[in-house]
Amino acid sequence: MNLYKITLHGMISGVNRIYGESYVVAEDPQKAYIKVKEFLDNEDIGFDTDRMLKSIELIASVDFEESNYKLYI
């Protein structure tokens, strides 16, 4: 498992700004984004264009070789 920072194109201001950057524990970057996207879709938060992926950053990993920071679960 890894800790990823998911940044979206939208939701960077106003009421929904808290969703513009999310931290997710997942096995890989694609699954991390899917977790965020499914939550926003199910809750109908923001517009479709706001939910588009801007970037994914690996923050920490349980496997120290993948990241400079260790993730303890």
Image (spheres, helix red, strand yellow):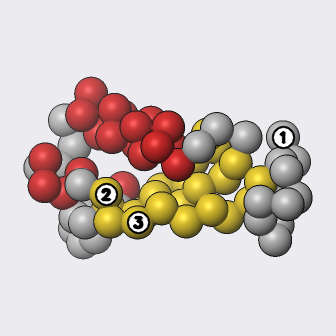
Residue at screen point 87% across, 58% down: 64
Q: Quadrant of the N terminus?
A: top right
Helix, strand or loop at mark 2: strand
Residue found at the far front of this picture: 65
Q: Which residue is mark 1?
A: 73
Residue at screen point 22% across, 64% down: 10
Q: CA distance from mark 3 to mark 1?
A: 24 Å
Cβ atoms at labels 2 and 3 below 8 Å apart: yes
Residue 15, can we see it? no
Q: CA distance from mark 2 to mark 1?
A: 26 Å
Q: Which residue is mark 2?
A: 53
The amino acid pointed to by label 3 is: Ser
Residue at screen point 70% across, 48% down: 2
Q: Looking at the image, tell me whether mark 3 or mark 1 is earlier in sequence order.
A: 3
The amino acid pointed to by label 2 is: Leu
Q: Which residue is mark 3?
A: 55
Q: CA distance from mark 2 to mark 3?
A: 6 Å
Residue 2, can we see it? yes
Seen in the picture, residue 33 relative to 59 is either above or below; the reply is above
Residue 46 picture location, percent across and down: 17, 49
Mark 3 or mark 1, whichever is nearer to me: 3
Seen in the picture, residue 13 relative to 62 is either above or below; the reply is below
Helix, strand or loop at mark 3: strand
Q: Looking at the image, tell me whether mark 2 or mark 1 is earlier in sequence order.
A: 2
Say left or right for 46 vs 36.
left
Say left or right for 52 vs 49.
right
